[in-house]
Image: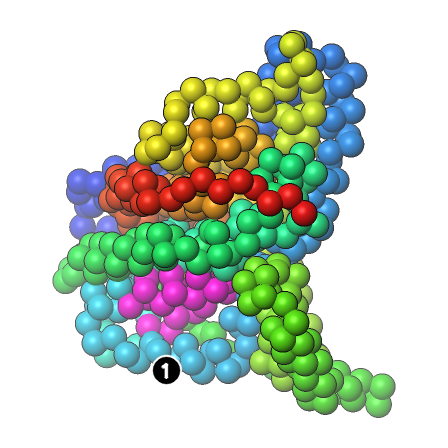
Amino acid sequence: MTATVPQIRTEKGLARVAQSLAGWTQKWFPDAYIFALVGVLLVAVAALANGSSPQIIVDSFGNGFWDLTAFTLQMAMVVLTGYVVATSRPVARLIDTLAAVPQSAATAVSFVAFLSMSVSFVNWGLSLVFGGLLARAIARRTDLRVDYRALGAAAFMGLGAVWALGMSSSAAQLQATATSLPPALLQVTGVLDFGTTIFTWQSLTMCAIIIALTVLIAHFSAPRGEAIRTAQDLGVDLNDEPEPAAPRSRPGEWLEYSRILPILFALLTLGWLVSQFLTSPVLSVVSSLNGYLLVFLMLGLVLHGTPRKFLQAVSKAVPATAGILVQFPLYAAMAAILTRAVGNGGMTVSEHLAEFFTSVGGGGGFTVIVALYTVILGIFVPSGGGKWLVEAPYVMQSATDVQMNLGWTVQVYNVAEALPNLINPFFMLPLLAVLGLRARDLVGFTFLQFMFHLPVVLLLVWLLGRTFEFVAPVIP
């Protein structure tokens, strides 16, 4: 728990506005699950207004509720595997080594931001926990006085800046996995592997620019001198010694404490991975969400050394998956009502929305409108993968209609999807638990990042979007 201590200095300017916004959000914003429930009702009302019958709406709701069962489990596993890998002893040793690198307070904050974003490109769940533990390790240093709030905000930059441009992007992973795509969306977009989304030179360039911008802002906005609030000032306990595994109590437990099984499963996974690279295109292997999760799960098992330690880490990770497990079925129901509840003129709400986006026209205007719409909706529906399933049917249909590259449309969504995380603290929750802080302690710094990111993102999606050509969807 965070102790209440007197402010050393009153925040001014953007930081003061951001702190006020954070306080208002904490007081008045309901849980994200409430937004999902209300979202389903609003979509149902929209379908009624469109002329759909109550029977069609309730059928769409019930029949679509479990459409995303596989994808829901996959997204929960992204969080779980990231947490398990980040809390292993080898990674903890790596974090302690990295924590000794920065030589000044401002450099420490920008260093955490850079590493958080770099790790997030591989796994956003890993980034949250890794960044939080790195911030704590730097805060434990007795030779360096660093603002713990700024360190915490920097640790969040992996999810607040570039997570959706990386390999664990919910939208990109979904579009690359035919079996996870709802049939209606599959017919619109086909399968888009990573070669058409996150690994295009345009997406990688955009990611590099945003990382550089974020690091600079983190460096120059880090409090200095008397404005610094350390973890000790905030009353945060920085003891991170892992709990020892319970001793063996019976002969039947010996395999739980043995390294034999993790080693054997590591060999099985390595053999499977080699086979995949020898028999399938590289991009197809890299784009496989199931393969990605298998590798990360087995990596966690190996890094923890024994099944017992691994299962202890899994038990601690499970609570962080709760939001995904209960919200994604609601997003599936929302998408089903949008795309299946036919109303006046034989059109669904999704088709009416597609007409609106198509009316904007192609080129830069389309990408900017999609990005702005994604940011606004994301403030109220904080779920990258779930929200993509709501947006994708009409946004991707509109992209096809105006001949906008489908892979780039996914990336426009991805880069814009990260921006609301800098305002809405929903996805901060796992990190806040690691840091021992409140959302209002971080949002002052993340809101400042948002003020710079928004215009840069809009400019980038417009400029880089002009370098693409339309490619017809590939339907498997």
Q: Is residue 261 above or below residue 140?
A: below
Count neighbours of disc 1 (C-alpha within 10 A) and say few if under 14, some if 14 to 19, many if 20 or more.
Answer: few
Residue 211 position in % (x across, y down): 30, 58
Q: What is the chief secondary structure element of the magenta stretch? A: helix
Is 90 part of what is drawn in magenta? no
Q: Is residue 292 visible?
A: no
- Look at the image and give the residue range highlighted in magenta: 111-138
Q: Going 65% across and 27% down the picture, which residue do you hit?
A: 339
Q: Name which residue lies at 55% across and 49% down.
A: 192
| Depth check, front residue: 387 or 243 | 387
Instruction: Give the colouring mode of the picture.
Output: rainbow
Q: Looking at the rendering, which quadrant does residue 295 occupy?
A: bottom right
Along the horizontal axis of the image, is 105 left or right of 77?
Answer: left
| Residue 112 part of the magenta-drawn span | yes
Residue 152 horizontal/vertical position (percent): 36, 59
Q: Secondary structure at mark 1?
A: helix
Quadrant position of the N terminus in the picture: bottom left
Q: Nearer the viewer, residue 87 or 340?
A: 340
Q: Is residue 306 above or below residue 424?
A: below
Q: Can residue 101 be seen by looking at this rendering?
A: yes
Which residue lies at the image location 66% right of the left edge and 72% below the top edge? 279
Specify whether 141 is left or right of 189: left
| Residue 177 x/y as whole percent | 63, 52
Foreground: 275 or 422? 275
Q: Is residue 289 above or below residue 278?
A: above
Residue designated by label 1: 97
Quadrant of residue 66 within the rendered picture: top right
Residue at the left extreme of this rendering: 225
User: The disc labelled 1 sits on which kind of residue?
Assistant: Thr
